Image (cartoon, helix red, strand yellow):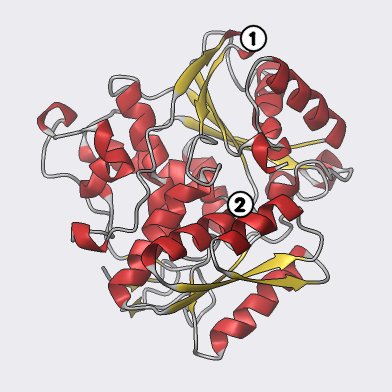
Amino acid sequence: MSLRCPACGENYADRWRCRCGTPLEFTDQPLPPTETPEDAAIDPRDGLWTFESFLPVGADPSDRVTLGEGYTPMVDAPEWDATFKLEYVFPTGSFKDRGATATLTRAKEIGADRIVEDSSGNAGAAIATYAARAGIDAEIYVPAGVKESKVKAIRRAGADVVRVEGTREDVTDACIDAVTDGEAWYASHAWNPAFFAGTATMAYEIAHQRDWSVPDAVVMPLGHGTMFLGAYRGFRALRDAGWTDQVPKLLGAQAAGYAPIAAELHGEDAVVGDNTVADGIQIRQPVQKASILDAIEATDGDAIALSKDAVASELKRLHRAGFYTEPTCAVAPAAAEVYRNRGVIGPDDDVVVPLSGSGLKG
């Protein structure tokens, strides 16, 4: 499918960014031909690709780059008065596999033979792994201080690792320099619309696992917005298809010191501190900022910043309850409690909290 710029309206066959600098989207959101989900052949044995009628990639099954990903468990978490969706139960141990399967499928469809990506860890591991599955060479740009366990996952998939000193933004800049030389396709989890089409499948699964109802609220980690925007677009597509009747309130959890969305909504005084624990969402300049703010406004949502102490404490609580997640995961359940205390989540609200990455990655 072709791409279009939501800002200026220009169309492209394939490009990683509009000439005006805006992230691109697919020209159309595919919707299923059936009026109700009961008429569709939804089979969890097909993983997230059972929702092929919602996906703008992989129309030819032979192009799909898949490892059987999808249909992660939904587990009651009474201690949190919520339901957890275990998004760390994936081939590479994080929800980023949703985006990677769609992105590498797109790369295969357009004939890419070399891809590059910049990542703090999980997205890089996912892209490298699915590139290996596709037989496409990969180069992953990472921060110099990234956890060695995540770098190992990238290298073992056969991808080249490029460490970049400086900020997370410096890593992206170095990767974009490699893209602009014209020799590689940018498989970016922040820019590539195929990645968001993949993460949207989490919303389809949540609705199906709840017998085609949607929760009152979903609380998610928020960095580049790959899960957050994917959930928004997925729930919106379900509503537009007539399969559900509403979009849940979407609530973001950012790390103090790296919380541009919360700062935009509540001012700089609401995001003071430096959360070094939630390393997976240390993003100061998300390229999808405008779209994230639009999603929050459209769903009566919100975004707040969490301190490192709150996240560290919540991580221990998760582990003691049997949820062996990585630190970044803990921002969402910690934020859910804050939202309840503030009345953003009501006492009788039905809440889903995705847990995004495995603790096995260190």
Q: Residue at x 40, y 45 (%)?
A: 200
Left or right of residue 274: residue 362: left
Using the image as rendered, state which of residue 211 and residue 63 is in the foreground: 63
Q: Quick check: 42 above or below 79?
A: below
Mark 2 lies on a secondary structure that is helix
Q: Residue at x 45, y 41 (%)?
A: 231
Q: Residue at x 76, y 72 (%)?
A: 164
Mark 1 crowdedness (10 Å alpha carbons): few <14, some 14-19, many ≥20? few
The quarter of the picture where residue 159 lies is: bottom right
The three-letter amino acid code for the residue at tag 2 is Asn
From the image, which quarter does the N terminus lie in?
bottom left
Of circles 2 and 1, which is in front? Answer: 2
Residue 73 in sight? yes
Left or right of residue 45: residue 361: right
Using the image as rendered, state which of residue 293 and residue 186 is in the foreground: 186
First along the sequence among labels 2 and 1: 1
Disc 1 target residue:
79
Q: Quick check: 207 above or below 165?
A: above
The three-letter amino acid code for the residue at tag 1 is Glu
Disc 2 target residue:
122
Q: Residue at x 69, y 78 (%)?
A: 174
Residue 44, percent from left and from top: 27, 32
Q: How many marks?
A: 2
Using the image as rendered, state which of residue 1 and residue 52 is in the foreground: 52
Residue 158, percent from left and from top: 55, 67
Left or right of residue 70: residue 259: right
The quarter of the picture where residue 172 lies is: bottom right
Mark 2 crowdedness (10 Å alpha carbons): few <14, some 14-19, many ≥20? many
Q: Give me the disc on residue 44.
A: none
Distance in Å between CA atoms under marks 2 and 1: 28 Å
